[in-house]
């Protein structure tokens, strides 16, 4: 086993400090007694109480959670269907165009995506609100779900699905009873990823949101322009906690799914051997 050199240790330390030290300071100062965010005056949780009494932030949080849950669910359904078609349908007319449209939001600048969606909604006469944010978030998060689910379907043993078809299942039942339970960890991970992306989005939401549908990132951005307050630190700390729990949960689900797949493969090898 190779030992880390002093250069590697220093590089890792500086890299992690650059990434995480600002967030650590933000969390620490969310418990600051003073309203001045750069002056430590003692430990206090009063700003969390002030945050819970702020109706504007609570309304924005409700809109954000509502949009994140709905858009991530729709994106998971559509992304899973798209991944299944791309992996299992083989070559068909328009496959290149279809896959390009699925993966385009991965490389498209968010400003371009938000502006194009805004022009689309104006063109069809759809008023900006929660619905337009849901449609926009579904559009850009669906491709991430498709990538996650596709990576699992590539390694999926098609003979299991074919066996279900031979035993009398139709395509829908075979997918529902055999394929979906096996790829469920990837589907759940895709949902959590889409939920996190929706929760964090600012650029696209700023184009497609209306006056009565302000999301939490937009509310934070508009408040920060007037100066950072302890309530912003408290709110950011809560968002960091939510995202951290989501990432850890997705990692554990993926790890458990990989371990289960490996155990099933070993059991199948022993049965055939």
Image (cartoon, helix red, strand yellow):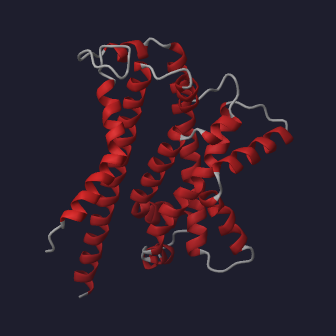
Q: Is residue 209 left or right of residue 164?
A: right
x, y percentage for residue 17?
Answer: 30, 47
The quarter of the rendered structure image containing the C terminus is bottom left
x, y percentage for residue 45?
Answer: 29, 16
Instruction: Give the answer, above or below, for where 190 lies relative to 66.
Output: below
x, y percentage for residue 263?
Answer: 25, 70
Q: Is residue 153 left or right of residue 129?
A: left
x, y percentage for residue 219?
Answer: 56, 26
> Looking at the rendering, which quadrant does residue 114 occupy?
top right
Q: Nearer the viewer, residue 273 or 221?
A: 221
Instruction: Give the answer, above or below, for where 106 lies relative to 229.
Output: below
Q: Residue at x 70, y 36 (%)?
A: 208
Q: Nearer the viewer, residue 239 or 13?
A: 13
The quarter of the rendered structure image containing the N terminus is bottom left
Q: Residue at x 49, y 43 (%)?
A: 195
> Looking at the rendering, which quadrant does residue 10 occupy?
bottom left
């Amino acid at each position: 086993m190779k030992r880390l050199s002093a250069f590697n240790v220093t590089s890792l330390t500086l890299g992690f400090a650059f990434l995480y030290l600002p967030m650590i300071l933000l969390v620490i100062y969310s418990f600051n007694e003073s309203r001045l965010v750069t002056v430590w005056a003692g430990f206090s949780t009063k700003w969390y109480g002030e945050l819970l009494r702020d109706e504007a932030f609570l309304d924005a949080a409700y809109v954000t959670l509502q949009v994140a849950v709905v858009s991530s669910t729709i994106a998971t359904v559509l992304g899973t269907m798209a991944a299944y078609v791309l992996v299992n349908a083989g070559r068909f007319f328009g496959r290149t165009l279809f896959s390009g449209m699925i993966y385009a939001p991965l490389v498209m600048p968010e400003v371009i995506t938000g502006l194009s969606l805004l022009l689309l909604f104006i063109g069809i006469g759809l008023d900006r609100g929660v619905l337009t944010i849901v449609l926009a978030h579904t559009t850009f998060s669906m491709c991430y779900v498709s990538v996650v689910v596709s990576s699992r379907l590539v390694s999926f043993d098609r003979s299991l699905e074919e066996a279900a078809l031979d035993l009398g299942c139709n395509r829908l039942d075979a997918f529902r009873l055999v394929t979906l339970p096996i790829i469920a960890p990837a589907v759940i991970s895709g949902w959590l990823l889409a939920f996190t992306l929706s929760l964090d989005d600012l650029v696209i939401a700023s184009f497609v949101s209306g006056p009565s549908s302000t999301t939490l990132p937009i509310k934070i951005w508009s408040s920060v322009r007037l100066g950072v307050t302890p309530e912003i630190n408290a709110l950011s700390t809560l968002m960091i906690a939510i995202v951290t729990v989501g990432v850890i949960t997705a990692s554990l689900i993926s790890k458990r799914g990989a371990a289960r797949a490996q155990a099933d493969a070993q059991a199948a090898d022993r049965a055939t051997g």
